């Protein structure tokens, strides 16, 4: 009985690794073949779709690297070395603008040297807050506005 459990545990371990590798290959293939640009979206596009796509892009290459704080990084450097909230916020704003929607980086101050940055993107349909690896979107509804 112990041998069956051990064999099953080993099988499960390797199956999980294989599944993770396969999933990573699918994501890489998706992003290599689905460049989400302004050609795909316009200013009236669904803000949820835009915000979630930007967040997925960030999640694909996200690496937190505190040693890059305050440094200007190219996109390749950000993907390889990683960055901090400010770098990912700048990326999100840039991608939003490329997709035809408004984007702004917001920086909040904390105690002493602590601070945090996140991106706010919006169009006439709503807005999204993209904060490193998370996104929260809200539709705006205007009734009887003159």
Image (tube, rainbow, N blue to C red):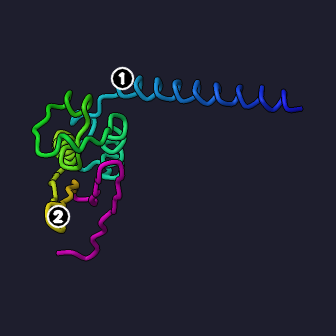
Q: Secondary structure at mark 1?
A: helix
At a point 35% along the width and 53% down the height, the residue shown is: 135
The numbered disc on residue 116 is none
The magenta segment is 122-146
- Other-residue count near label 2 (Cα within 10 Å), few / some / many at <14 / 14–19 / ≥20: few
Q: Which residue sits at x=33%, y=62%? A: 139
Q: Residue at x 29, y 29 (%)?
A: 35
Label 2 SS: strand
Residue nearest the observer in this picture, 117 or 94: 117
- Which quadrant is the N terminus positioned in? top right
- Residue 104 appears in view: yes
In the image, farthest residue toward the front: 2
The quarter of the picture where residue 56 lies is top left
Q: Earlier in the sequence, mark 1 or mark 2?
A: 1
- Give the residue pinned by disc 2: 108
Residue 68 % position (x, y) = 18, 40
Q: Foreground residue, 69 or 103?
A: 69
Quarter of the image where the C terminus is located: bottom left
Q: Position of residue 41 (x, y in %)?
A: 26, 40
For the residue pair 33 and 43, the one nearer the viewer reads as 33
Q: Position of residue 76 (x, y in %)?
A: 20, 27
144 over 82 or under it: above or below: below
Relative side of 145 to 51, left or right? left
Residues at badges 1 and 2 in contact (C-beta under 8 Å)?
no
In the drawing, does residue 34 fall left or right of residue 122?
A: right
Vertical comparison of 119 with 9: above or below: below
Q: Residue at x 65, y 29 (%)?
A: 13
Give the residue pinned by disc 1: 33
Q: CA distance from mark 1 to mark 2?
A: 36 Å
Question: Which quarter of the figure has residue 142?
Answer: bottom left
Does the image show residue 100?
no
């Amino acid at each position: 009985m112990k041998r069956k459990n051990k064999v099953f545990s080993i099988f499960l371990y390797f199956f999980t690794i294989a599944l993770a590798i396969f999933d990573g290959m699918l994501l890489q293939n998706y992003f290599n073949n689905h460049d989400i640009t302004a050609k795909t979206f316009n200013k009236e596009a669904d803000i949820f779709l835009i915000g979630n796509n930007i967040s997925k892009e960030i999640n694909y290459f996200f690496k937190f690297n505190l040693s890059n704080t305050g440094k200007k990084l190219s996109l390749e450097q950000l993907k390889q070395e990683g960055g901090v909230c400010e770098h990912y916020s700048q990326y999100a704003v840039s991608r939003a603008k490329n997709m035809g929607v408004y984007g702004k980086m917001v920086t909040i101050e904390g105690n002493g040297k602590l601070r945090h940055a996140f991106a706010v993107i919006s169009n006439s349909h709503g807005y999204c807050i993209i904060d490193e690896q998370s996104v929260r979107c809200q539709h705006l509804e205007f009734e009887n506005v003159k």
